[in-house]
Image (cartoon, helix red, strand yellow):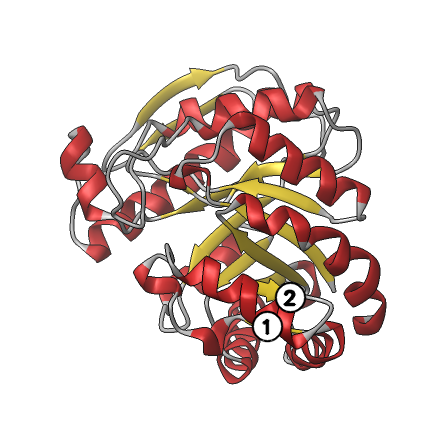
Amino acid sequence: MKFCLSIEIQEGLTYAETLALTQAAEAANFDASLLAEHYYPSSGRAGLMAADAWVFLGGLARETTRIRLGTLVSPVTFRHPSVLAKLAATLDHLSDGRAELGVGAGWLADEHTAYGFAFGSGPERVNLLEEQLQVITGLWGQDPFSHSGAQYHLEACHFSPRPVQQPRVPILIGGTPAAKRLPRLTARYADEYVLGLGTVAECKATRERLDRDCTAAGRDPSSVSLALFAGVCVGSTEQEVASRLARLMEGARPHMQNLDTWILGTPERAAEKLRELAAAGVDRLMFSVDNPLHREMVPLLGEHIAPLVG
């Protein structure tokens, strides 16, 4: 199992704090540092800075050397897919081939209202996601590329820069355990499905659904990975875990308050849960971090817990 950070920069994290988390993760042999993309704090707490993820990523690309970088996720409601394809391909050059592009249908209605982004129904946003995936993969894979769809029209586009990674920058699609269409889109267009806050049983069911969808799409199921987004609070002792958890829960976002979906405890206890998730088919674990306090946990995760998981 590979460990990754999912940094919730919209909860007031500065670039310096984001860099410190990412560099600590790189030193602890984490696979990736992925930034949430929100224009508004998802906690609903007023007054918090919500910086631009792509600008932060450009800085991180020049101040790291190995760790992979990207978004988790970029809502398709924010911009034209040609712009998103350009951002990800440019990051791939800045990082010497370490970029990842996470995309999703968007879910935080308040930020759309506040910033004036259209926020259609769930099915409408998934339709938009599918068409954006068609455009992005087309731009990266065909030269010239033309497209005529419900929302976007491109004519003989010669896209540049071509991604460093071939055949493309890896694409991640974020979704929920209940989603049915999103795993199908992953099987057709993407490289990884990121499950939000799932239990072990939900991970196993999602992995089985992905396998079926890949087979139906004529694709090897092993070519599409499964990741899990989860809260994390670990410590060397139970007392340390309890102290850290109390501080984290003071500002916890509403959807993060179910501790059954967290990775909790001392190294042995956390590793036991992670081994169960690995057996259920989880390839990468996206640890949700939104507080500088998480910086203290990164070495413990990478250097002590990871070896117990295998």
Q: Quadrant of the N terminus?
A: bottom right
Q: Position of residue 84 (x, y in %)?
A: 44, 28
Amino acid carrying label 2: it is: Val
- Seen at 36% across and 73% down, the residue is 178
Q: Observer-nearest residue: 145 or 15?
A: 15
Say the numbered circle drawn on residue 234: 2
- Residue 264: image tag: 1
Tell me the residue at 24%/34% (across/down): 151
What's the amino acid at mark 1? Leu
Against 11, residue 55 (above or below) is above
User: Which residue is rendered at x = 64% and y = 46% of the image?
Assistant: 295
Q: Are marks 1 and 2 in contact (CB under 8 Å)?
A: yes
Mark 2 crowd level (few <14, some 14–19, many ≥20, 10 Å Cα): many
Q: Residue at x 67, y 82 (%)?
A: 276
Residue 85 visible from this viewpoint: no
Q: Is residue 308 left or right of residue 73?
A: right
Q: Position of residue 197 (x, y in %)?
A: 46, 68
Q: Which type of secondary structure does the marked residue at label 1 adopt?
A: strand
Relative placement, left or right, of 128 versus 222 is: left
Element type at mark 2: strand
Q: From the viewer's perspective, tell me whether residue 41 is left or right of residue 249.
A: left
- Residue 120 shows in this picture: yes
- Residue furthest out toward the bottom: 201
53 and 270: which is toward the camera: 270
C-alpha span from label 1 to label 2 = 5 Å
Among the 4 quarters of the image, the one containing residue 41: top left
